[in-house]
Image: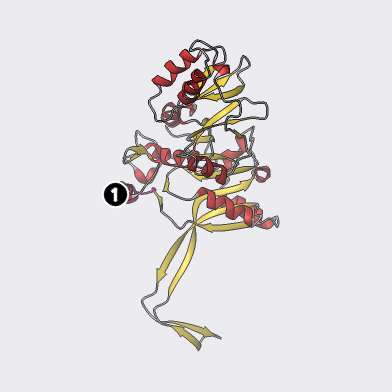
């Protein structure tokens, strides 16, 4: 989505606006008027122009006479999932997000966005993908295509759909292919930047290199995951528990084909279970944490997410686990890659 195509200057005429609207290849197009300082001052549709003409305004009069001054908008970090749903129910598709001074930050498509999580995201995409050779000999693992898109693009699109548009990608092996593909993210209505690991820094060590984090929360995830995790639910669980850090988990079931005895003092049988099923929860490679926890990560050292989790526990802070109840696949092996090619045919992603 090109934001510039939705903008028109305040010195334009209604005739200019109609020509602009006519070029917009979408149902119910809308323009947003910006003044000389580039602040948003109103919205305009073809219906607004028709109503203005019925009030005897001229087609060459300024758009300022036709526009809606009380246009619908969101203020950055001050709108909720309910606000998005309300606009969607009113069939209002495009809503600008402005800062406290009235400058446009981004445009929200309420038909696509499912939440507004106040977090930035960091995608770890620097690994070599040794177990996927020879597929990764000339292509970094996150850029391997599953269906119609690279693996990492599913994750980026999912994050954006939940309102997370400030994204950093940590790159190393063949990283230029990733940066050349996504560039600055403007074509996705997002801001994408990159940091390069000169040496391998583990699953979370590169996060320390980010200088400016503008959100209170940071979502970190491996880029080689294929998942339709509900990020909104993950964030809500994190907030409900007043946690300092959350790790997404996936259930792992173990079926024991025999009766299992519970022994006491080595030999005394106190109980037994016939062919029991045990469920364990494994790390899914997705983490949410308060920004201040980044201070616990050492500079320029290999540091894994499990190291941070241990540090959080030892510091007496609150770490929670939240299960992914939908689809999740770690594409780490050749067989996983081919499984993903079949699974994607039956999954609904943006």
Q: Please count the marks in the image.
A: 1
Residue 42, image quadrant: top right
| Residue that extends furthest to the top in the rendered view of this protein | 60
Q: In the rendering, at what x and y percent does residue 141 appear?
A: 39, 40
Q: Which residues are magenta?
A: 331-337
- Report if residue 12 is visible in the image: yes
Tell me the crowding category of disc 1: few under 14, some 14 to 19, or many 20 or more residues within 10 angstroms, Cα based: few
Closest to the observer: 173 or 341?
Answer: 341
Label 1 sits on a secondary structure element that is helix
- Which residue sits at x=51%, y=31%? 190
Q: Is residue 324 magenta?
A: no
Q: Is residue 343 above or below residue 274?
A: above
Query: Which of the image's four quarters has the C terminus?
Result: top left
Q: Can you say whether 99 is above or below 162 in the image?
A: above
Observer able to see residue 124: no
Position in image of residue 335 (x %, y %)? 31, 51
- Say left or right for 180 vs 33: left
- For the point 41% across and 69% down, the residue is 254
Instruction: Report whether 293 appears left or right of 325.
Output: right
Residue 175, relative to residue 306: is it above or below?
above
In the rendered view of the protein, which quadrant contains the N terminus? top left
In x, y percent, where is residue 29?
A: 44, 27
Q: Which residue is mark 1?
A: 342
On the image, the x and y values in percent for residue 10 come to 57, 15
Name the residue at the right extreme.
316
241 or 47, which lies in front? 47
Residue at point 65%, 52% (across, down): 244
| Colour convention | secondary structure
């Amino acid at each position: 989505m090109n934001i510039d195509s939705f903008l028109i200057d305040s010195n334009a005429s209604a005739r200019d606006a109609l020509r602009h609207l006519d070029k917009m290849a979408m149902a119910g197009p809308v323009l947003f008027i910006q003044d000389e300082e580039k602040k948003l001052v109103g919205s305009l549709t073809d219906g607004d122009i028709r109503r203005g003409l019925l009030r005897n305004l001229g087609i060459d009069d300024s758009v300022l006479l036709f526009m809606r001054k009380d246009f619908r908008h969101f203020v950055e970090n001050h709108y909720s999932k309910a606000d998005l749903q309300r606009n969607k129910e009113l069939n209002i598709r495009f809503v600008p997000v402005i800062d406290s001074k009235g400058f446009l930050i981004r445009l929200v498509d309420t038909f696509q966005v499912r939440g507004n999580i106040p977090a930035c995201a960091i995608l770890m995409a620097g690994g070599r993908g040794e177990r996927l050779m020879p597929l990764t000999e000339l292509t970094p693992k996150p850029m391997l295509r599953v269906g119609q898109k690279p693996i990492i693009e599913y994750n980026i699109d999912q994050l954006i759909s939940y309102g997370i548009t400030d994204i950093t990608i940590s790159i190393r092996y063949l990283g230029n292919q990733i940066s050349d593909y996504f560039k600055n993210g403007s074509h996705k209505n997002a801001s994408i930047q990159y940091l390069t690991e000169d040496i391998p820094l583990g699953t979370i060590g590169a996060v320390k290199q980010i200088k400016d984090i503008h959100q209170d929360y940071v979502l970190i995830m491996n880029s080689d995951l294929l998942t339709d995790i509900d990020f909104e639910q993950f964030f809500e669980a994190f907030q409900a528990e007043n946690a300092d850090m959350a790790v997404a988990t996936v259930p792992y079931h173990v079926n024991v084909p025999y009766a299992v005895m519970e022994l006491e003092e080595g030999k005394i049988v106190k109980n037994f279970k016939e062919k029991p099923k045990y469920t364990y929860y494994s790390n899914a490679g997705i983490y949410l944490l308060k920004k201040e926890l980044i201070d616990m990560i050492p500079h320029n050292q290999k540091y894994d997410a499990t190291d941070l989790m241990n540090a959080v526990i030892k510091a007496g802070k609150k770490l929670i686990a939240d299960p992914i109840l939908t689809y999740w696949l770690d594409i780490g092996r050749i067989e996983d890659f081919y499984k993903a090619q079949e699974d994607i045919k039956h999954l609904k992603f943006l």
